[in-house]
Amino acid sequence: MKKSKLVLLAVALLVAAVLIFAVLRWRNSHRPGRDEILSTLLEHTNGTIGVVYVDVAESRQSPFAQKLFAWAPKPQADPDYARFIQDTGFDYERDLDRVAYAAAKRGSQSTWFAIADGTFNRKKLTAYLAKVATVQTRNDREIYSFAPSGAEASSNTASGANASPAPQLFLTFIADGRVAATNDPDLGALLAQKNPSGDFPEWQAHFTRLAGSPIFIVVRQDASVANSLALQAPGGLQSPELAALFAQLNWLTLAAQPQPDALRIVAEGESSSDTVSHQLSDMLNGLVILAQTGLNDPKARAQINPQARAAYLDVLKSAEITRIDRQDAKAVRVVFEVTSEFLNVATLPRPAAPQANAPPATPTPPADKPGKHSTRKK
């Protein structure tokens, strides 16, 4: 064979190898993952106000997450769920990979949309759903709808014309390893439309900042969200001043990053006002100092379990509060760590609270010893 033909053959083999490598890389890079599932979520959700993302597969491999799962109380065995596993072969503790959830608001209507990736036996799962749900075909998709457990019974017992219908869940397969669910009755139309809103880049920017966290929440604030968060704060943290500052935040994020021996929590509030970020940072730093002072008070030392007190102080000592300037956005970031000791403290029995207006306990006189006469006066 001539040398020129050998050169051409070598070049052809090299080009073929490069093309095969490129195709393999392209296929691997386009497997459903975090960025893709979040983009799909926003594409089919209008008026998004909050997103929750959980990479179950990654969290499952974390040593601390395994400790957390072992620490959490185990629910009682549910015969219905055991039957579900037997019929479908799907167990969320083993087969669920990732979940993305979006809460949306359109006018006065609140809706949600969720996507879940996992190892599904589609044939078994669709056969099971056909037994327990109503099946309809919309936009060439089989939509399964059913009322959550207990909703139908409560709806049937409601009397009068004003009884509200039981909430329903609508579910369908997007692919063999992906399902979508919502409370919107028109799930088929929801999946057919792709309406990325104008704020899509802003959501994407926040997702990118949280790329290292397998678990996170992103909330775009409005007045109703801020008021709801303020009302749900623990009694000791409810403050009109703090609530007023939170109401001026445009974005809130919360992320959990499992470490070998701890869970790193990163919370961030973002505002367009430099004054708000300064005031919020100062107030949060003051709350940390106040909490440390309270735990070091002699009365607190006497009343709080020493192990619990030490765990609380460790969390406060790990807290870092910093301000971040992103030009148009001013953020306040709070970072702290939850350790195994803190989890153990949560299982300690709480001291019984003294009863209000309870009469003082009357000491019980010592009982007479058997075989001897009492020497007490009657």
Image (cartoon, rainbow, N blue to C red):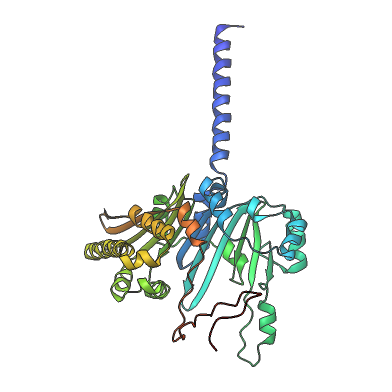
Question: Which quarter of the rendered picture does the C terminus lie within?
Answer: bottom right
- Number of marks in picture: 0
Image coordinates of residue 354 in percent, x first then y, are: 45, 78
- Please say if 255 is above or below 170: above
Nearest the viewer among 164 and 82 is 82
Q: Nearer the viewer, residue 366 or 112?
A: 366
> Which x, y percent locates residue 97?
59, 51
- Where's residue 138, x and y in %? 67, 66
Snapshot quadrant of residue 305: bottom left
Q: In the rendered view of the protein, which quadrant contains the N terminus?
A: top right
Q: Residue at x 32, y 74 (%)?
A: 239
- Report whether 331 appears left or right of 131: left
Q: In this picture, is 359 found above or below 58?
A: below
Where does the image place residue 252, in percent across and percent down from the top left? 38, 62
Which of 154/363 is in front?
363
Name the residue located 71 percent from the left edge and 64 percent from the top edge: 78
Farthest residue, direction top: 2
> Position of 174 compared to 296: left or right?
right
Q: Is residue 139 left or right of residue 312?
A: right
220, above or below 19, in the image: below
In the image, taking residue 354 as reference, residue 268 lies left or right, namely left
- 200, 225: nearer the viewer: 225
- Name the residue at 59% across, 70% down: 183
